Structure formats: C-alpha cells, structure tokens
Image: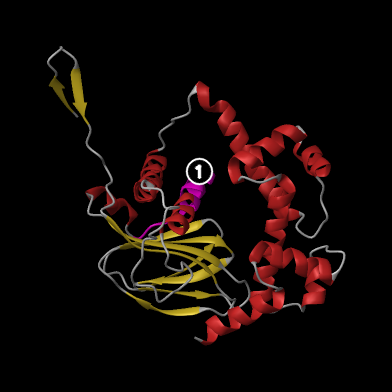
Amino acid sequence: MISEKSGLGYEKTRLHPLIVVDSIVTVHYFEYSSNYYFSGEAHDFWEFLYVDKGEVFVMADTKKRLLRTRDIIFHQPMEFHNVSANGIVAPNLSVVAFECTSPAMDFFKDKVLQVTEKQHNYIADIIDTAYQLFDSPLDDPELKHLTVKNDETVFAGYEQLLKSSLELLLLDMLQSDKGESRIAATVYQKESDIDLYARTLRYFEEHVRDQLTVEVISDAMLAGRSHLQKLFHEKTGSGIIENFSRMKIQYARQIIREGRLNFTELAEYLGYSSLYYFSRQFKKLTGMTPSEYSKSILSKNKS
C-alpha cells in the first residue's frame, strides 16, 4: 500500500487489488443426463467447473479425476480438458470462463477444491446475475458469445456485480488456503444463520421423499418457525415449503434425465399423492410437464 497526503493533512491509502477479472467469456449452468460426454477443448483463458449436484469425471491434460457435489476444478489457459457423466447420476454443473492475468492465479493451477457454503453462494450469485444480464441461453454448450440484454429490466450495475462475485470467490479461496481467521464478534449471528440454512437444506435432501410441513421442519431444526421462515425469505425470496418443493422437482428432473423410473413411479417415489398433483407441481415450477421436460432432454442429447 502507498499513502498519499491530502491538502487537509489526511492520508489516502492507495489499494492494490490481488485479483482482477478482465472479462467474462462464458457462463453456463447445465443439467446433463447421466450419459453425457464432452470430447474436450483447450482455450486461451481460465475456466472453472463446479459440480452443483451429482458427480462427473474430468480429464485435465493427462490427469483424470472424479468430482463430486461441491467440488470445483480450475483449468488454466491452454490446458486441454473434457468432462463426462458416470452413466448413473445426472449432474448439474456450473461452468464459468474468464480472463485474468493476475499473478495470484498461479494458485489455481491444477487445483481441485471443496467449496464452502460461502463460496457456493458466490457461485450462485454469478449464475443468477448472468441470467439477469444476458439474453444468451446458459444451458447451450455451443455458446461462444454472451449477448447482453437490451431492455429496461437490466440494472446498470449487473456487469460489475458479476465481476465482483467472481473476484470475491477467487479471493475467498485464496484466503481460505492461507488459513486466516476473519470471524468478528459482529458476524456470529450471520454465521449461525448460515449454518441453520445449510442444515435445513441437508434435512430437505435427506427427506426429499417425505411430505414435510413447516412445523415438522422447524422442530427438526430446533428453530423457531417465524425465524426459519424469515431466514429462507432473506436467502431465497420464498418460504420453506416452496424451497422444499423446488428441491423435490429438482430431484425429479435428475431422475427423469437418468431414466430410472416412469412418471407414476417417480410421483410415488417422491411422496406425491397422485401423478396429477406431481405433474401440476412440476409444470408450476419448470414451465413444462414431466413428459415435455423428458422430450427436451432427449432432443438436447441428440443434438
């Protein structure tokens, strides 16, 4: 840091950023079938692949790795890489390509890391902001150019939010590796809420086949109903049951991509009272019926 004297005697400290993202190349969120395979490529920019759900095999140069949920791998410029599903589990993947010439990026060469809850939220912010900023379909694997929306709904700061979220993700990973403690007394409540939120999501996953109520969930989490509802509204903009319903449908989409159950079996497996109710919930949350979603996946696989 360099200090400068101002006219009134105050000293200004010039800040020197450690990580600067120069540009975004592509942002993707994929829901692949269990038999997905990408033959591979190499390019002159950085890229990370994050396993949001499921697991995949990733080849980076000559090393083949198995990545599971919450794993992230970085590919340095000109590193050949490919990816394939394991033939059993249908994966959800976030892939972000970007340009960054900061020397600190050397840390990420040949790195596979386990993502923390905080880092997971940064990745979610990147994807959410990309959906708000770009017209381009983020599930198109052939996408080479991101087109910025040109309408009144686009906030002028979305580009900076996208850049900042990516830089914060990289910086947090660098700092986590240093083992530095940054917990202050004022953030204990936030950390407690983050833990409660994460535990509740894990509870959802463990009971995704059940029919849960707000009271059952609150009792299991040893948390007040109103506090838990407020926490989920702050985190997601919707209530506890809405989030649980979305997780159920997310599991349904994965099972459809894996082709393990027919729709009647799937509705029963996930605890729905009838195929009609399951189909209605599926369309409400995805905009498609289960059969329409299945056909769209088959069409993407053929293409």
- Camera-nearest residue between 185 and 114: 185
Q: Position of residue 122 (x, y in %)?
A: 46, 47
Q: Is residue 238 left or right of residue 72?
A: right
Which residue occupies the extreme bottom position in the image? 302
Label 1: which residue? 118
Magenta segment: 110-124
- Up the image or down, 300 lies above or below 233; here it is below
Work out whether residue 67 or residue 225 is closer to the camera in this orientation and state it: 225
- Residue at point 32%, 73% (across, down): 80
Is residue 239 visible in the rendered structure shown here?
Answer: yes
Would residue 120 be counted in the magenta stretch? yes
Residue 232 x/y as whole percent: 65, 42
Q: Position of residue 168 (x, y in %)?
A: 38, 44
Q: Quadrant of residue 270?
A: bottom right
Query: Which amino acid, mark 1?
Result: Lys
Membership of 289 in magenta stretch: no
Left or right, 142 with respect to 69, comes to: left
Left of 52 or right of it: where is 24?
A: left
- Residue 75 seen in the current view: no
Q: Residue at x 51, y 22 (%)?
A: 186
